[in-house]
Amino acid sequence: MRAALVAERTEAPALAPKRVGEPVVRVEGLNHYYGEGEARNQVLFNNHIEIPAGQLVVMTGPSGAGKTTLLSLIGALRTVHEGKVEVLGRDLSRLGAGDLVEVRRDIGFIFQMHNLFDALSAYENVKMAAQLGDASKDEIRQRGSGILERLGLGHRIDYKPRFLSGGERQRVAIGRALVNRPRLVLADEPTAALDRDATMNVIRLLKQTTMEYGAAVMMVTHDHRIIDSADRLVHMVDGRIMSDVVLHDALRICEFLRPIELFKTLTPRQLTDVAEKMSKRHYDAGATIISKGDAGEEFFLVSDGEVDVIRADREVARLGPGDFFGEVALISGEPRNATVIAQKPVDTYVLGKTDFEAALAASQSFRDQLYRTYFLRQ
Ligand SMILES: Nc1ncnc2c1ncn2[C@@H]1O[C@H](COP(=O)(O)OP(=O)(O)OP(=O)(O)O)[C@@H](O)[C@H]1O
Ligand SMILES: [Mg+2]
């Protein structure tokens, strides 16, 4: 029986998903409580999320929102109370203690309490974790020192933790979590103690883990340098996943849309729905983006660069990043009342008429506000 299991392990590629297309993480209707009896306090409410292989997911949210609790349930570090957590196709609530240990072996944990062994050097700490895998001795040595070098710790390989800074210790812990090329990485503020260069190294390594080895990474962070590299952004508030946006551009679009008066009345969900429907379009300097008299088909948001709005051969406005145009004709149904020309090379996000109208229909307050803005501009 044991031999059969070992044979199965060595035949399968190290990172093959259990079943093709199966998500690495599947959470359904997850509730969680701390305390007993009268002190029982619900901290997670009906959460759902599915994470496929290869995705770098960043989780944000205020302190106490439940981010660490959610990660520790997915990491089989806490018992699931209500709802379902599946990791690599295994339903955690059906597993015994021994099987849970097996599940944890497929996971790279980067938590704030990094628990390095004080008596071991940086390299030995990483090697300890690597010995759990199936790799040969040479491979282990190469991987262990290679990963520390990539984390900028090549000169600290033989140092014991007490001779390392907080940030260096944190990076050793990251190396230890990644050395086995886990299928799932759970990270709780992994770059909190790191400077810019070290943070960039960690991001590169995590990106590589997702892109080359097909791992899923779930990371709590408020670090914008990491958020920029995310494939997906999950935002938690008061124990609930409030928004869940796939796509890098959508994040940037939301950041642009949120401060605009017009979009303030949209809920985060509606805002991300709009963001997801916008596509990126580039215009060279001098290009005409819209022409006076044309039918209005699209709404534009300036991402980078500048445009001039021209009415009756006179420039009436110069718009830059975060500004928008093109909404008037969409609302009124009349032809474009101005020409807009790229003053410099310009990147825009574009929303088609149908999606614009759908956003309008989704929110009465948004509609009211749009009409107010429209009539005020007349
Ligand atoms: N061991 C525990 N016992 C009782 N309550 C807890 C425990 N751990 C967390 N909580 C409570 O559960 C809620 C969610 O906590 P959690 O640590 O998951 O939040 P978080 O989003 O990770 O916050 P932070 O950003 O501060 O790390 C909070 O109200 C917290 O006080
Ligand atoms: Mg936390």
Image (cartoon, rainbow, N blue to C red):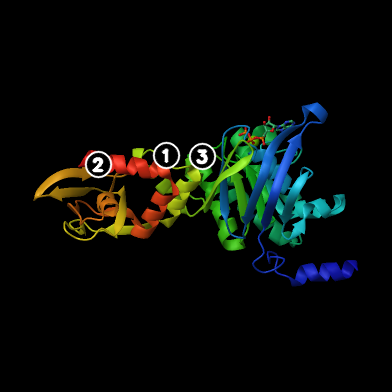
Q: Amino acid at mark 2?
A: Phe
Res. 179 visible in picture: no
The x and y percentages for residue 34 are 76, 33
The quarter of the picture where the C terminus appears is: top left
Q: Which residue is mark 2?
A: 375
Q: Which picture quadrant has residue 61?
A: top right
Left-right relation of 180 to 208: right
273, 94: nearer the viewer: 273
Q: Residue at x 80, y 70 (%)?
A: 8
The quarter of the picture where the N terminus appears is: bottom right
Q: How far, Cα to Cα, is label 3 from label 2?
A: 40 Å
Q: Residue at x 74, y 62 (%)?
A: 136
Q: Is residue 75 above or below residue 115?
A: below
Q: Crowding at label 1, few (<14), some or many (≥20) Cα neighbours within 10 Å?
A: some
| Residue at the extreme right of the image, as rendered | 1
> Does dot 1 land on a helix, a strand or a loop?
loop
The x and y percentages for residue 180 are 70, 56
Res. 351 visible in picture: yes
State whether label 1 is within 8 Å of ligand 1. Answer: no
Q: Amino acid at mark 3?
A: Asp
Q: Which residue is mark 1?
A: 265
